[in-house]
Amino acid sequence: MIEQLLAAVVLAVCVALFARLLIGARRRRRLDAALQSLAGTGRRALQSTRSAWRWRAAQRSSKQAADEAIRRAREGGTWEGNVYKPKSFRKPPRDKMH
């Protein structure tokens, strides 16, 4: 099954290349330009799809980071106005230092 499909694809490519040789130079240039334009369109579509996947992944990771920061802020530390001071940044008491 796979061998027949591969043979059909190779045959189609060979026929297309042979037909390209039979047409005149002006039509060949137009055909090549159209194929290059089509390839560029496909490339841009693929890149935009990749960008969409990366954007979604970045959005998901930033949401997780924000949720984690909110969770840490709720668990410990103190708020002085709009400034959050986590417990881990507090200096140890002077009697426990050297």
Image (tube, rainbow, N blue to C red):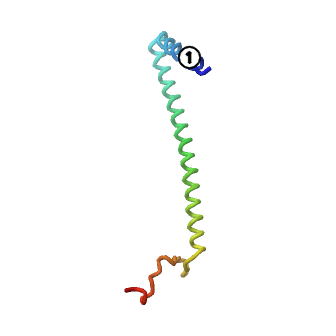
Expressed as whole percent of the image width and height from the top left, the position of residue 3 reads: 57, 19
Q: 41 or 75, which is in the foreground?
A: 75
Against 39, is 86 above or below?
below
Is 92 left or right of 55, judged from the image as shown?
left
In this rendering, the count of numbered labels is 1
Q: Is residue 40 above or below residue 48?
A: above
Instruction: Report which quarter residue 60 is drawn in.
Output: bottom right
Q: Position of residue 55 (x, y in %)?
A: 55, 50
Q: Is mark 1 on a helix, strand or loop?
A: helix
Q: Camera-side residue: 64 or 33?
A: 64
Residue at far right of view? 1
The extreme top residue here reads 22
x, y percent for residue 38? 53, 28
Which residue, as the protein is rendered here, is positioned at the far bottom?
A: 95
Which residue is at a point 58% across and 50% down the rendered structure image?
Answer: 56
Q: In which quarter of the image is the C terminus?
A: bottom left
Q: What residue type is labelled 1?
A: Ala
Look at mark 1 in the image and give the residue it sits on.
7
Quarter residue 72 falls in: bottom right
- Residue at (50, 20) in percent of width and height: 31
Q: Residue 73 versus residue 25: which sits nearer the camera?
A: 73
Q: Is residue 11 above or below residue 49?
A: above
Residue at horizontal 52 percent and vertical 15 percent from the top:
16
- In the image, residue 23 lies at what x, y percent? 49, 11
| Observer-nearest of 94 and 12 | 94
Instruction: Determine crowd level at label 1: few under 14, some 14-19, many 20+ residues with C-alpha closer than 10 A.
Output: few
